[in-house]
Amino acid sequence: MMMTVICFLEKPLAVLHKIFRVLVNGGYIILGFIEKDGEIATQYRQEKIKGKFLRFARFRTVDVVVRFAEDAGFSEVSVARRARGFCVMNGRKPYKHERNADMTLCFHSNPMPFSTQILRINFIILRVREN
C-alpha cells in the first residue's frame, strides 16, 4: 500500500517495478494519491504550512499513474475510489502463467491444453538460458 507517496518519488516507475518484483504472484498493490489540479492539491498549496511541505510534490493525473502501474507489469489496474482530487486505485500482479499466455500463442499454432503450452514455453525458455 502506498498512500500519498507517489507524488514525492523522482522515479515512480522504477519504484513500481521494484514493488512488482517483490510482490507475490496474484498479489495486489493499492495506490492512494493526490491528483494533479484536484481540489485537495489546490487547497493544500494555499495553506501556509502544508504548502511548504508540498512544494516538493509532483502531483500526477490518474491516467499517468495508471500508465506507470501498467508499464511496471500490473494488470487489472482500476480506480477504486475518487473524491475531491484524491484517488485510490489498485492493480494485480498476474500469476506467471497469465504473463506467459501471450508468449505461448506465438510458439504454437495448433490447439493443445493450456497447461501443456505453459510446460512447453517454460522448456523453451530454459533451453535458451542454458545456451
Image (cartoon, rainbow, N blue to C red):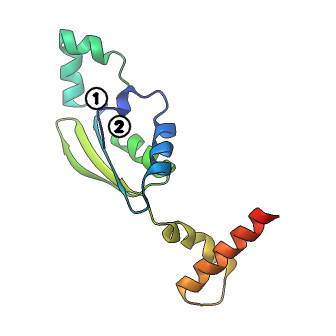
* Residue tagged 1: 37
Query: Nearer the N terminus, badge 2 or badge 1?
Result: 1
Considering depth in this image, is 66 or 115 the residue closer to the camera?
Answer: 115
Three-letter amino acid code at disc 2?
Thr
Q: Residue 2's image quarter? A: top left
Instruction: Tell me if residue 123 can be seen.
Output: yes
* Residue tagged 2: 61
Q: Is residue 78 above or below residue 13?
A: below
Q: Are marks 2 and 1 in contact (CB under 8 Å)?
A: yes
Q: Is residue 94 above or below residue 84?
A: below
Q: Secondary structure at mark 2?
A: loop
Question: Where does the image place residue 120, in percent across and percent down from the top left?
Answer: 66, 80
Q: Residue furthest front?
A: 130
Mark 2 surroundings: few (<14), some (14-19) or many (≥20) residues within 10 A: some
- Is residue 127 shown left or right of residue 85? right
Three-letter amino acid code at disc 1?
Asp
Question: Where does the image place residue 131, in percent across and percent down from the top left?
Answer: 82, 64
Q: Is residue 41 above or below residue 56?
A: below
